Image (cartoon, rainbow, N blue to C red):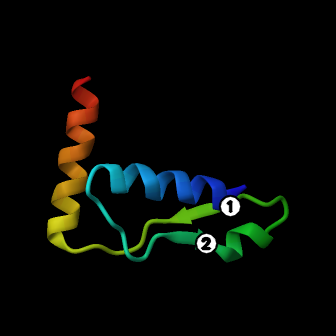
């Protein structure tokens, strides 16, 4: 279910101090046959992009 994945991603981002305001389910992708739901990450400002980059780098170092 895309909503479950969306909330898990939102929670993981929040745990790293990151909020993506446009994060959501791409509804047209849910209606395709076969359904291939997509999570739309949306736009973010430069500070958020930097925070996301830093979090990904820290995770890659583990």
Secondary structure beneath dot 1 equals loop
Quarter placement of the N terminus: bottom right
Farthest residue toward the top?
62
The percent position of residue 56, horizontal first and vertical second, equals: 27, 42
Q: Residue at x 48, y 53 (%)?
A: 9
Q: Residue at x 60, y 53 (%)?
A: 5
The answer to whether residue 55 is left or right of residue 4 is: left
Q: Residues within 10 Å of mark 1 (few under 14, many from 20)?
A: some
| As drawn, 29 above or below 5 | below
Q: Nearer the viewer, residue 22 or 36?
A: 22
CA–CA distance in space, label 2 to label 1:
7 Å
The answer to which of marks 2 and 1 sits earlier in the sequence is: 2
- Location of residue 11 by image quarter: bottom left
The percent position of residue 39, horizontal first and vertical second, equals: 55, 62
Residue 60 badge: none
Secondary structure beneath dot 2 equals strand
Quarter placement of the C terminus: top left
Residue holding disc 2: 26
Q: Nearer the viewer, residue 51 or 17?
A: 17
The percent position of residue 33, horizontal first and vertical second, equals: 85, 64
Q: Residue at x 19, y 56 (%)?
A: 51
Residue holding disc 1: 37
Q: Residues within 10 Å of mark 2 (few under 14, many from 20)?
A: some
Tally the numbered discs: 2
The answer to whether residue 38 is left or right of residue 23 is: right
2 and 1 marks in contact (CB < 8 Å) = yes
| As drawn, 55 above or below 1 | above
- Location of residue 20 by image quarter: bottom left
Q: Nearer the viewer, residue 4 or 38?
A: 4
| As drawn, 24 above or below 38 | below
């Amino acid at each position: 279910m895309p909503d479950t994945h969306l909330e898990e991603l939102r929670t993981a981002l929040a745990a790293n101090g990151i909020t993506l305001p446009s994060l959501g389910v791409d509804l047209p992708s849910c209606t395709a046959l076969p359904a291939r739901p997509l999570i739309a990450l949306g736009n973010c400002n430069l500070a958020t992009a930097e925070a996301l980059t830093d979090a990904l780098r820290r995770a890659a170092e583990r």
